[in-house]
Image (spheres, helix red, strand yellow):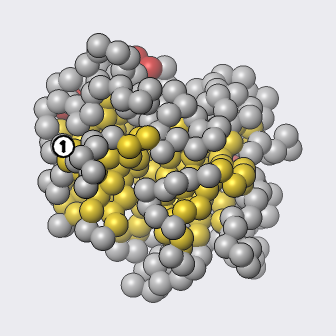
Amino acid sequence: MNIRFFSLLALAGCTVFGVSCAGSGTPERSGNPIFEGWYADPEAVVYDGTCWVYPTSSLPYDEQLSFDCFSSDDLVHWTKHTGILKQADVAWARRAMWAPAAIRKDGRYYFFFAANDVHEGEVGGIGVAVSDRPEGPYRDLLGKPLINEIVNGAQPIDQFVYEHGGEYYMYYGGWGHCNVVRLKEDFTGIRPFDDGELYKEITPERYTEGPFLFERKGKYYFMWSEGAWTGPDYSVAYAVSDSPLGPFERIGTIMRQDPAVATGAGHHSVIRIPGTDDYYIVYHRHPLGDGEGAHRQVCIERMTFDAEGRIEPVRLTFEGVEARDLSRNL
């Protein structure tokens, strides 16, 4: 069932899978997936009361040549922005443009991405683009990869950028290894940590790929994906540390497949509603009964914590989340 079907039912004034429809008298919900199409690896961020989702176009590698993004003011109604960065505008990219990361700095919008499914001795890895608007168009900032080499066994993919105390850290890595680097202020390169190291390996137990970090109540939650991305057991686990640089010791899994809903739930991001302690997890998953690994859809669920600050298991749903005015607490 896709979002177009939900929309038609909404016009008829009915409710499906608990999703509110016109005239039903119950809160309107997003439904899952939240928008049409095969997309994966969603990076969700909130800028000025609007949620932006930057995903991978989940196609064969040689067809992954551009990025789209989606925006919403309420987590329910989404607007598609096509071709915000294209292979034709990145001289060194030729295929496999993957897993964006997005951050705003000094009024400009930066878009980090991986390209070429790079291996040893090849050109590719992590790049960075910039725009004056969150929906782009973006232009390649460097004309070359920001990180090309394979260090500590980590393929340079799946980057996530985090600001802490005026410093910008980038967490990245596939092939079961994760590094963190410190970015230059203008994002044109990396610079040494205080001990002189350029790359610090922070790989937790069972890590595969897809790192993500957020801070809550003075604790740093480091999250990642485990298992094979094409398989049903793809899942999300996490650790907690007193420092954004770790150490990160695995606590457990908080999202996994539900045989009644979907399989392969992983490679996520997290947003917090400004001014609240309300969190949402945005992730991709495989439809039931579909054995094509690239057939992935972007979904959203609420993410909650217990009294000790542990992340509670996230239940996969068809309903998604209730509409939320993201500008209310600005």
Q: Residue 50 lies in what quarter of the image?
A: bottom left
Camera-side residue of 290 and 187? 187
Residue at 67% across, 32% down: 227
Local crowd size for mark 1, using a 10 Å CA cut-off: few (<14), some (14–19), many (≥20) = some
Camera-side residue of 311 and 92? 311
Q: Position of residue 249 (x, y in %)?
A: 62, 52
81 versus 218 height, above or below = above
Q: Position of residue 270 (x, y in %)?
A: 53, 60
**For the view shown, which residue lies furthest in the top direction?**
121
Q: Position of residue 302 (x, y in %)?
A: 66, 66
The quadrant in which the N terminus is found is: top right
Residue at 66% across, 22% down: 292
The quadrant in which the C terminus is found is: bottom left
Instruction: Give SS at disc 1.
Output: loop
Q: Residue 327 lies in what quarter of the image?
A: bottom left
The answer to whether residue 38 is visible is no
Label tally: 1
Residue at 28% across, 43% down: 197
Q: Position of residue 101 (x, y in %)?
A: 37, 48
Q: Amino acid at mark 1?
A: Gly
Camera-side residue of 205 and 232? 205
Camera-side residue of 30 and 5? 30
Residue at 19% across, 60% down: 108
From the viewer's perspective, tell me whether residue 153 is left or right of residue 303. left
From the viewer's perspective, tell me whether residue 167 is left or right of residue 324. left
The answer to whether residue 178 is visible is yes
**For the view shown, which residue lies furthest in the right direction?**
260
From the viewer's perspective, tell me whether residue 322 is left or right of residue 180. right
252 versus 330 height, above or below = above
User: Which residue position is annotated with label 1?
Assistant: 189
From the viewer's perspective, tell me whether residue 133 is left or right of residue 181. left
